[in-house]
Image (cartoon, rainbow, N blue to C red):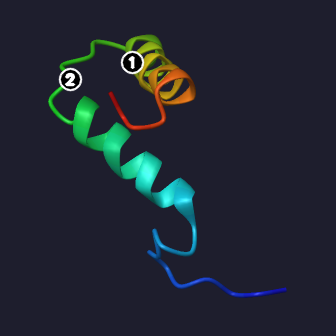
Amino acid sequence: MFQLPTYAPDLNPTEGIWSLVKRDIGNLAATNLAEITRAVKRRLKTFQYRPDGG
């Protein structure tokens, strides 16, 4: 097992993805969890098809 630092986007690319997702939904005024879930899924799908973040 290799212990990664708490925040290491260069060692764990997932950190960079979540950072971008959180930035995009940071000002979301959701009224319920379903809205947040849809927004996150939509943004992750964007990364799936456009890895450059577009």
Give the secondary structure at mark 2. Answer: loop
Q: Nearer the viewer, residue 37 or 15?
A: 15
Q: Position of residue 20 (x, y in %)?
A: 33, 44
Residue 28 location (% of width, % of height): 20, 23
Return the residue nearer the eye: 30 or 26.
26
Kindly identify the amino acid type of the residue bearing the numbered disc 1. Answer: Ala
Residue 45: image location, x then y, percent: 53, 20
Q: CA distance from mark 2 to mark 1?
A: 9 Å
**44 horizontally vs 3: left or right:** left
Figure check: 52 above or below 38: below
Q: Classify mark 2: residues with Cα within 10 Å, few (<14), some (14-19) or many (20+).
A: few
Residue under the point 27% across and 16% down: 30
Q: Residue at the location (36% across, 35% down)? A: 53
* Residue tagged 2: 28
| For residue 30, above or below residue 23 | above
Disc 1 crowd rating (10 Å Cα; few below 14, some 14-19, many 20+) is some
Tell me the quadrant of the picture where the N terminus can be found. Answer: bottom right
Up/down of 11 relative to 38, above or below: below
Would you identify the image quadrant in which residue 36 lies?
top left
Amino acid type, mark 2: Leu
x, y percent for residue 29? 18, 19
Residue labelled with disc 1: 39
Question: Is the C terminus in the top left, top right, bottom left or bottom right quadrant?
Answer: top left
Judge from the rendering whether residue 13 lies leftward or rightward of residue 24; answer left or right: right
Residue placed furthest toward the right: 1
CB contact under 8 Å: marks 2 and 1: yes
User: Which mark is first along the chain, 1 or 2?
Assistant: 2
- For the residue pair 8 and 52, the one nearer the viewer reads as 52
Q: Is residue 21 above or below residue 10?
A: above
